[in-house]
Amino acid sequence: MKKIFALSILVLCLSIPIKIRAQSTIEWSRDYKLKWSDFKAEADTTILAFANTVYKIEISPTNVAVDSNNHIQNYEALTAVAQFYTKLSWVYEEDDNLLKHEQLHFDIAELYARKLRIEFEKLKQEKIANFNTYSAAYNKFWTECKALQMKYDSETNHGILIEENQKWENDIIHKLNSIKSIH
């Protein structure tokens, strides 16, 4: 008997409110940079910030079948993409340097989406179809992504330290360029 599980929803429930699924998204692309008009939510003035970027690493396809042995059917199709949530992201005070800072949050999400795609490809090559194995890989890279995001905000004082932000931008862009994008 097959059970239908939504892989991304399961992971999503562990870390992000479920309402995100229904929001408009922008998939990360080398050719597209965020604009302030992409930040469509009303600013949350209870948070001490000038902008907030909401992103996620989405597993695709979103609905996968898992059999009674915990094996994902059609596991070969699994991939990961970084997505920006327009209706949850907001800006209070627009500034070019702040926009670069927010873009880099999205770039960091793409960096970890790439790492996850590489891990998924390794698992696929080994013909591993176990749901828990893919879920553990996702959780590992999602945890690392969140930790790096927090470090980035801390070391750049949320983008206020422009020179430090530029160092981070150079480092992340270098890392993105050194990892082939697998889709």
Image (spheres, rainbow, N blue to C red):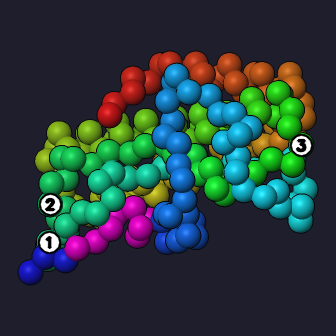
Q: Percent from the top left, x then y, of residue 142? A: 52, 52
Q: Residue at x 64, y 56 (%)?
A: 87
What residue is pinned by disc 2? 73
Q: Residue at x 50, y 64 (%)?
A: 22
Q: Main secondary structure of the magenta part?
A: helix
Depth check: 47 or 171 in front? 47
> Magenta stretch: residue 10 in it?
yes
Q: Magenta region: which residues?
A: 4-11
What residue is pinned by disc 1? 67
Secondary structure, mark 2, is loop
Q: Amino acid at mark 2?
A: Gln
Q: Is residue 19 above or below residue 181?
A: below
Q: Amino acid at mark 3?
A: Glu
**Circle 3: is it few (<14), some (14-19), or many (20+) Cα within 10 Å?**
few
Q: Is residue 53 left or right of residue 131?
A: right
Mark 3 or mark 2: whose residue is earlier in sequence: 2
Q: Residue at x 59, y 51 (%)?
A: 85
Q: Is residue 133 above or below residue 98?
A: below
Depth check: 50 or 108 in front? 50
Q: Is residue 47 above or below residue 171?
A: below
Secondary structure, mark 3, is loop
Q: Quadrant of residue 72?
A: bottom left
Rounded to the nearest whole Å, what is the CA distance between mark 2 and mark 1?
Answer: 7 Å
Rounded to the nearest whole Å, what is the CA distance between mark 1 and mark 3?
Answer: 50 Å
What residue is pinned by disc 3? 93
Q: Are marks 1 and 3 in contact (CB under 8 Å)?
A: no
Q: Quadrant of residue 120?
A: top left
Rounded to the nearest whole Å, what is the CA distance between mark 3 and mark 2?
Answer: 47 Å
Mark 2 or mark 1: whose residue is earlier in sequence: 1
Depth check: 70 or 53 in front? 53
Q: Nearer the viewer, mark 3 or mark 2?
A: 3
